[in-house]
Image: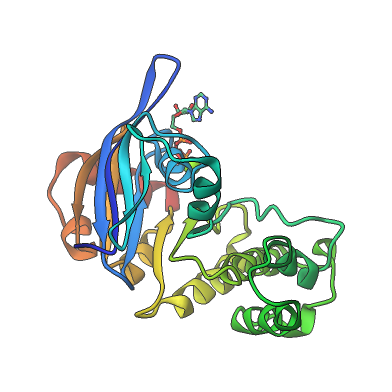
Amino acid sequence: MAFFEVQDIRKKFDNDEVLKGVGFTLEKGEVLAIIGSSGGGKTTLLRCINFLETPDTGRILIGGDEIFNADAPGNEEKQKENRLRIGLVFQQFNLFPQYTALENIELAPRLLKKYPEAEIQSRTLAVLERVGLAEKANLYPYQLSGGQQQRVAIARALVMEPDILCFDEPTSALDPELTGEVLKVIRSLKSAESTMIIVTHEMEFAQGIADKVIFLDHGSIALEGTAKEVFSSRNDRIRAFLGNYSRDAE
Ligand SMILES: Nc1ncnc2c1ncn2[C@@H]1O[C@H](COP(=O)(O)OP(=O)(O)OP(=O)(O)O)[C@@H](O)[C@H]1O
Ligand SMILES: [Mg+2]
């Protein structure tokens, strides 16, 4: 039994089927990179996994526990609990501008009573330390660079200790010189304990960090395998995608 199992996710918006039966499995500690052309359904898939959208079909399981089944919707309380097992870091950081870095991170654990009050500050400082920002704890988002804001957003996800941590193009809103520091932090999170799903256009990064790669094309998995298998594949669609990609990069 795989640690994380996603089965047959379909999602339609009006009559447009954006996800056409997507499924995959991940073992604990594995990193999955999802690549593919714009509009292919990558964000929609992450939003379905994070319950920001309700899939039309399919099941999602963590450690054998069914956390979603389109045929048997659970009660709201259960859904809320399940949602916390999966974290999401957005492209646009989404920090609260009126709160400091520290307060942004403390908010969810305090609201949801994740830890006793006495532990919240030490846990918050520990995750800020992990993303290299302990000394910026009391600054507001406007006082931080884009890369630093994204690292706070990562710390905010980490403090909730999700079973799966998802990233949706975590560096695409950043200037190239700020991308490196964020990718470095994400790389440093890779461990036997943390299972991650990363949607990215940074092909070199994907190749370096991913245990598995999925090429999502028009709502279906066109290719899946190890990073080596996918990036060296002779499949026409992936060659065309990677070809466009290297031209864009020039
Ligand atoms: N809430 C929505 N309502 C209607 N259509 C939507 C909605 N969300 C996404 N779509 C459509 O679903 C398709 C897939 O979008 P999605 O954002 O998942 O693609 P993507 O692979 O993340 O693209 P990108 O690389 O540009 O971020 C697009 O055609 C988009 O217009
Ligand atoms: Mg997207």
**Of 198 and 163, the residue lying toward us:** 163
Q: Position of residue 234 (x, y in %)?
A: 12, 49
**Of 35 and 109, the residue lying toward us:** 109
**Which residue is found at the position 80% from the left and 63% from the top?**
141
**Which residue is found at the position 38% from the left and 80% from the top?**
191
**Is residue 206 depicted above or below 55 in this figure?**
below
**Which residue is found at the position 54% from the left and 41% from the top?**
76
In the rendered structure, the answer to whether residue 141 lies left or right of residue 203 reads right
Q: Position of residue 161 (x, y in %)?
A: 53, 71
Q: Position of residue 156 (x, y in %)?
A: 64, 66
**Of 244 and 118, the residue lying toward us:** 118
**Is residue 40 depicted above or below 6 in this figure?**
above
Quarter of the N terminus within the rendering: bottom left
In the rendered structure, the answer to whether residue 36 lies left or right of residue 94 reads left
Residue at the far right: name it: 98
**Is residue 42 depicted above or below 211 in this figure?**
above
**Residue 111 lies in what quarter of the image?**
bottom right
Residue at the far left: name it: 234
**Residue 8 lies in what quarter of the image?**
top left
Question: Is any part of residue 250 visible from this angle?
Answer: no
Q: Position of residue 72 (x, y in %)?
A: 35, 35
**Which residue is found at the position 83% from the left and 56% from the top?**
97
